[in-house]
Image: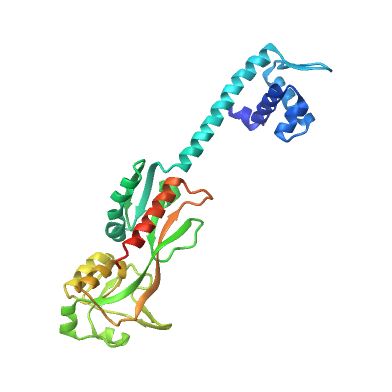
Amino acid sequence: MQEFLDQGGFDDLLAFVAVADTGSFVLAAQRLGRDASTVSRRVGKLERRLGVRLLSRTTRRLALTEIGAAYHRRLQSVLDELNSAGRDASERAATPQGLVRVSVPMSFGRLWIAPLIPGFLARHPQIRVDLRTTDRYVDLIEEGFDVAIRVGTLPESSLIARRIATYRDRLVAAPGYLARRGVPQQPGDLMDHDCVGFTGYLSWPDWPLVRDGERVTVRPSGPLVSDSSEALLLAALEGVGIGLFPDWLAGPHLAEGRLVEVLPGWAGKTDGGVHAVMPPGRLVPAKVRVFVDDIAQALKAGWRW
């Protein structure tokens, strides 16, 4: 069967069905957008492959043979089924339904994405979600993910990326720490303070800071470094030292007064992005498009950082 199709057999079948439907090579050619001689050659090729005569040709008329009529009926049922399958695929693609496999960073996913999933499922009962949390950059195509939520700078790739939120990196500390050690007045003062350092920053062990276009780089030191931003946040809350955290992580604690911004106006990142990343291709399935739209809207509506 595969060899038959590889040799252009499907086009031969379509040519025969068009001739059988219209009773004319000329009309069949008009339907297919081909010339009549090409259609005639394709039908002849099909007859030679099958070893039977499908059409009875005379100078005055064209008719199906008995075998040709039976073959046409069978082919027509197959083509009807193919058309039905195509319509079904299009309808399923247009209707949000099915499984959405999602990869999210552990901290951001736990704090900001996971709480949104129940509401999303309630609004879209025909969609199921497989949510995987990892700080590893997954290969969407190789590992079969429909979308990944990624925080920070994206590497160059052919993937589709949509920014769904922004954030800043802020210097923060617990009020108790600042009462004990004093409040820094300028970036250079950080060298005299205990700092907690996130080794996951691309710039580590440096903190590049910016304010109104002015840029300064400091190299902090202190009693704790970690690849877990949440572990460092807990330490900062306990007064261990000053930390540089994204406001999606530190924001709620700043609002509650458990943390205080240090050197207001100075930031490690002023235009950080949260992105929904999807496999390349012009068409994004409806289930994925709805998921990304819903999450983006929910993040915007619940903006607390």
Q: Position of residue 277 (x, y in %)?
A: 43, 56
- Residues 253 and 176: in front is 253
Instruction: Check the picture and name the quadrant holding the C terminus.
Output: bottom left
Instruction: Check the picture and name the quadrant holding the N terminus.
Output: top right
Q: Position of residue 46 (x, y in %)?
A: 69, 23
Q: In the current view of this chain or complex, which residue is farthest to the top?
A: 66
Establish if 174 lies above or below 95: below
Which residue is at 69% across, 26% downward? 18
Which residue is at 45% across, 46% downward? 286
Q: Quadrant of residue 64?
A: top right
Q: Quadrant of residue 164?
A: bottom left
For the image, the number of numbered tags is: 0
Establish if 142 lies above or below 178: above
Q: Position of residue 92 (x, y in %)?
A: 46, 38
- Residues 156 and 114: in front is 114
Establish if 103 lies above or below 244: above
Establish if 54 lies above or below 224: above
Tell me if I can see residue 138 in this picture: no
- Residues 211 and 60: in front is 60
Q: In the current view of this chain or complex, which residue is farthest to the right?
A: 59
Tell me if I can see residue 200 in this picture: yes
Which residue is at 42% across, 43% downward? 96
Q: Position of residue 236 (x, y in %)?
A: 21, 73
Q: Quadrant of residue 3?
A: top right
Q: How is the image coloured?
A: rainbow
Left-right relation of 231 to 211: left
Which residue is at 30% across, 58% downward? 106
